[in-house]
Image (cartoon, rainbow, N blue to C red):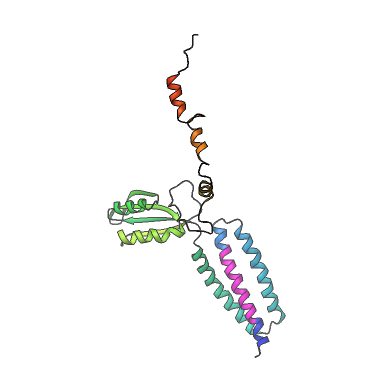
Amino acid sequence: MDLSTLLIPLLIFAAEVCVVTLGTLRIIFVARGQKILAPLLGFFESFIWLVAISQIMRDLSDWSCFIAFALGFALGNYLGICVEKRLALGTVIVRIITHRDAGALIARLRGANFGVTAVEGRGATGKVQIVMTVAKRKQLPRITALIETHHPSAFFSVDDLQSASDGIFPTPRERPGIIPLSLVSLVRLVMPGADKPAELAGRGDGGADDRGDYADNPEPASLG
């Protein structure tokens, strides 16, 4: 078997890996309501699939093309899940159920700027505390680390959340970019007196002296 004979199965394998990887991500994005990413991935998915299937249909007797197609399908599913986990898009709700006092855990979660709601409940063996918090999926390892530290035996579940409105979420950590200073900081650095007019505007046109002038020369009382 020469190189030209192996080239078509390899191309079919690579194309099917891309197709299924994109398809897995597209399904996940559809479930999460990504209106732009899902159709965009669907376009590339269908285009690459047509290229791969057209190569298979040219020679239906070549079994190596079918094997390559099946292997690409299997690997594409695995890669799609791995890529989605690495992206960690979306929001999750974490429910923690414990028989112990969850005060320390609640304090640590709130100390990390997570919004926490705690309610009393009753389980199979008695009273329990139910602690709930909503967070970004990228922040889930921080929550699980706090649970394992303060309540290693607590039961907790993680569910995907379609959307969440007003709530308390930790401030994302700022990463140094190409421009380390913000636009406002850059303006203040170049023009140190740029923010003085705003300060004077809050006190009047005359700045701090206006209050003294007004106290020394009050307006005459109305005669009417």
User: Does 119 lie within the magenta span?
Assistant: no
Residue 202 is situated, as x and y percent measured from the top left of the image, at 49, 32
Q: Is residue 205 left or right of residue 139?
A: right
Along the line of sight, the residue nearer the viewer: 102 or 222: 222
Residue 218 is situated, as x and y percent measured from the top left of the image, at 45, 18
Identify the magenta region.
Answer: 9-26
On the question of residue 151 being in view, the answer is no
Residue 133 is situated, as x and y percent measured from the top left of the image, at 40, 52
| Residue that appears at 63% across and 74% down | 15
On the question of residue 75 being in view, the answer is yes
Residue at the farthest right position: 58
Along the line of sight, the residue nearer the viewer: 55 or 210: 210
If the image is split into quadrants, where does the N terminus sit? Answer: bottom right
Along the line of sight, the residue nearer the viewer: 128 or 123: 128
Name the dominant secondary structure of the magenta segment. Answer: helix
Q: Is residue 27 left or right of residue 98?
A: right
Q: Is residue 143 left or right of residue 224?
A: left
- The answer to which quarter of the image holds residue 124 is bottom left
Q: Is residue 155 left or right of residue 3?
A: left
| Residue that appears at 50% across and 38% down | 196
| Residue that appears at 58% across and 63% down | 26
> In the rendered image of this protein, does residue 220 appear above or below residue 59?
above
Residue 130 is situated, as x and y percent measured from the top left of the image, at 35, 52
- The answer to which quarter of the image holds residue 94 is bottom left
